[in-house]
């Protein structure tokens, strides 16, 4: 709807440079523009006077008259727009017809986005700390794909570097068989080494020596490395399957081993490499130099990230590269992006570091090195168990939750599936409700939010809409043949649908009912879905989508609790079909938008709960 309003405003005032947005506070309208204030500043005029001049042009435009029921000036010169009933119904029709495509667009225009996310280190448990990058990255992937971008997900796992030398030393010195070690045992070896190295610092020389052997392709070092890598990848894939996450490519740091010399040679030829105490560095304006090779000749994480960028440019020619990596890497990525610009590798690419906050323990940062982590699998299994317990005790209601009706009429296998969807959905949603930059203090109770602004609340609201539609089908088959499930006919294909203004007027006549305040609030909320999708992608903030979905669900449940959607057996004869069909269309539209939004967030939507 935003594009229709924007086009109409541009046409009415004859200005192309117009920006509109949806105000956070609903009393300020559905859309607002500051164009009068911008023009006033350029022309040295009073913004309210300019706003009055523009308002006259806007109010005389025939398209605006159809799209808006009210246009007013507010504050220092904002112009606010309230959508008309015809426009709101037109949007509802689009929701019902487009279905899973509603909210999607061709905004990406074929542009390519590479998203680097998850990126666990091998030989370590998949901890709760990995959750943020994984679920935020997957949500960003889904958002950009929904907007028509070609999206590449790349899992840049840590399988190289001195930290791996610690394991090689441990496995060799203890005479262990690497193929028989579990990930838990490998992590314990890593923790043990770091504990010992605090007492005997020379152990780090052993680790560095083993990593040097690995870079020099020592057969024994390579054999141990490969066994540990295979064990780790099996573990990662098991956790990804549990989370419902699938990433397009997995390229470990080792993948770039044979590409780093080319990078170093290029930088040397361009005169960008300097010697510093036996190491090679690259100097960057306004920040500390970055190390390319250490004094012993081994490469660094920084060098491997440069090789990664060069590979991605050659392989996918991206327009945007997004790194969903923790905020403890802010300086590193500033250095990487600055070096890329200095080297002059396709400077048209936009690089973005979405620096997520960390999941911390109450006393501080989690640390694998010190053995202070929480296994993600333990968290997910606990969440599933808690959801199952609520389903089994469905007589105990949850305020704003899904219990009370949960589990009724479900088979044992259906209960298990719902418990998994609800439990895992709760954990993922809890993370996604936070702005990516926010730190989260780990709390076993808070991470399993099953009420209020939570995945279970949204999942239950979706299941409620589907229950209404199933009941509708039964009524339609028996006593109300004219009752429709809210899918107005159209001669246009869903993907090509763009209602003309005159069609909106026609639809208003078709659904001519006295709409109550609760229904209007739901209609106005549905309109904002497409705008929120764009905003969440552009701001790299899936939490904008979670907030929107919760707001929509609240409005629908308030409507549901106050107004009857379906007639009782006694009321069928006197039931007004126009009201029934409108409310069914509204219910179907809300269910569709909840499903689309939760799917983008990577959260399942059970049909029954």
Image (cartoon, helix red, strand yellow):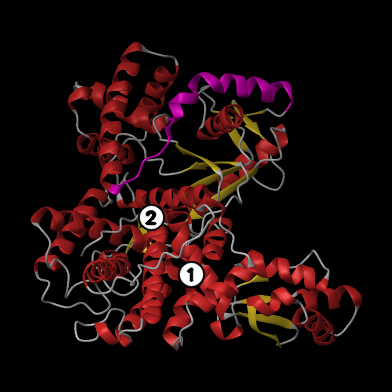
Seen in the picture, residue 574 relative to 363 is either above or below; the reply is: below
Residue bounds of the magenta highlight:
243-271
Q: Residues within 10 Å of mark 1 (few under 14, many from 20)?
A: many
Examine the structure image and report whether residue 255 is included in the region drawn in magenta: yes
The residue labelled by disc 2 is: 599
Taking 319 as reference, is 432 left or right?
Answer: left
| Residue at 21% from the left image edge and 23% from the top image edge | 179
Can the viewer see residue 337?
yes
Spot occupied by residue 261 in the image (x, y as percentages of width and height) = 58, 19
N-terminal-most mark, 1 or 2? 1
The C terminus lies in which quarter of the figure? bottom left
The kind of secondary structure the magenta stretch mainly shows is helix
Question: Which numbered dot is residue 92?
Answer: 1
User: x, y percentage for residue 337?
Assistant: 63, 42
In the image, residue 13 sits, relative to residue 191, either above or below, namely: below
Q: Is residue 148 magenta?
A: no
- Residue 320, by quadrant, is top right
Q: Is residue 59 left or right of residue 146?
A: right
Q: Nearer the viewer, mark 1 or mark 2?
A: 1
**Is residue 357 something one can see in this rendering?**
no
Q: Quick one: SS at disc 1? A: helix
């Amino acid at each position: 709807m935003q594009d229709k309003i924007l086009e109409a405003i541009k046409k009415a005032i004859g200005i192309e440079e117009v920006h509109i947005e949806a105000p956070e506070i609903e009393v300020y309208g559905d859309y607002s523009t500051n164009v009068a204030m911008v023009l006033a500043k350029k022309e040295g005029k009073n913004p309210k006077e300019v706003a009055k001049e523009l308002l006259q042009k806007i109010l005389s435009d025939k398209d605006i008259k159809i799209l808006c029921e009210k246009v007013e000036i507010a504050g220092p010169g904002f112009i606010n727009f309230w959508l008309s009933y015809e426009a709101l119904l037109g949007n509802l029709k689009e929701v019902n017809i487009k279905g899973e495509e509603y909210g999607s667009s061709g905004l990406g225009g074929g542009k390519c986005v590479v998203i680097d996310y998850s990126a666990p280190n091998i030989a370590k448990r998949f901890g709760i700390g990995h959750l943020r990058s994984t679920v935020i990255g997957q949500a960003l992937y889904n958002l950009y794909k929904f907007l028509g971008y070609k999206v590449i997900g790349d899992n840049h796992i840590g399988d190289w570097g001195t930290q791996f030398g610690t394991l090689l030393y441990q496995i060799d010195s203890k005479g262990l068989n690497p193929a028989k070690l579990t990930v838990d045992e490998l992590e314990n070896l890593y923790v043990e080494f770091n504990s010992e190295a605090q007492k005997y610092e020379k152990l780090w020389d052993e680790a560095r020596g083993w990593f040097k052997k690995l870079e020099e392709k020592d057969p024994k070092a390579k054999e141990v490395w490969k066994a540990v890598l295979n064990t780790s990848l099996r573990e990662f894939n098991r956790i990804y399957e549990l989370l419902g996450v699938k990433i397009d490519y997995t390229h470990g740091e080792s993948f770039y081993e044979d590409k780093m010399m080319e990078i170093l040679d290029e930088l040397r030829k361009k005169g960008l490499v300097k010697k510093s105490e036996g190491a090679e560095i690259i100097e960057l304006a306004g920040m500390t130099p970055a190390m390319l090779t250490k004094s012993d000749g081994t490469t660094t994480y920084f060098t491997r990230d440069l090789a990664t960028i060069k590979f991605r440019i050659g392989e996918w020619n991206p327009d945007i590269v997004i790194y969903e990596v923790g905020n403890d890497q802010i300086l590193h990525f500033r250095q990487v992006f600055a070096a890329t610009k200095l080297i002059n590798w396709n400077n048209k690419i936009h690089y973005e570091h979405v620096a997520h906050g960390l999941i911390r323990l109450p006393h501080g940062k989690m640390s694998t090195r010190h053995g202070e982590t929480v296994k993600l699998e333990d968290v997910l299994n606990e969440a599933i168990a808690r959801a199952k317990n609520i389903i089994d005790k469905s007589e105990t209601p949850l305020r704003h939750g899904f219990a009370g009706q949960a589990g009724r009429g479900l088979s044992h296998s259906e209960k298990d599936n719902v418990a998994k969807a609800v439990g895992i959905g709760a954990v993922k949603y809890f993370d996604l409700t936070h702005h990516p930059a926010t730190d989260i203090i780990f709390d076993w109770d808070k991470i399993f939010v099953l009420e209020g602004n939570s995945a279970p609340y949204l999942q239950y609201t979706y299941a409620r809409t589907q229950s209404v539609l199933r009941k509708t089908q039964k009524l339609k088959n028996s006593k109300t043949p004219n009752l429709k499930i809210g899918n107005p006919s159209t001669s246009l294909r869903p993907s090509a649908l763009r209602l003309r203004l005159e069609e909106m007027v026609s639809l208003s006549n078709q659904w001519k009912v006295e709409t109550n305040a609760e229904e209007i609030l739901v209609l106005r909320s549905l309109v904002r879905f497409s705008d929120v999708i764009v905003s969440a992608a552009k701001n790299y903030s899936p939490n904008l989508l979670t907030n929107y979905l919760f707001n929509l669900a609240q409005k629908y449940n308030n409507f549901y609790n106050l107004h009857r959607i379906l007639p009782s057996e006694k009321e069928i004869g006197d039931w007004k079909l126009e009201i029934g069909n409108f409310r069914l269309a509204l219910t179907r539209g809300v269910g569709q938008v909840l499903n689309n939004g939760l799917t983008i967030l990577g959260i399942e939507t059970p049909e029954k709960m």
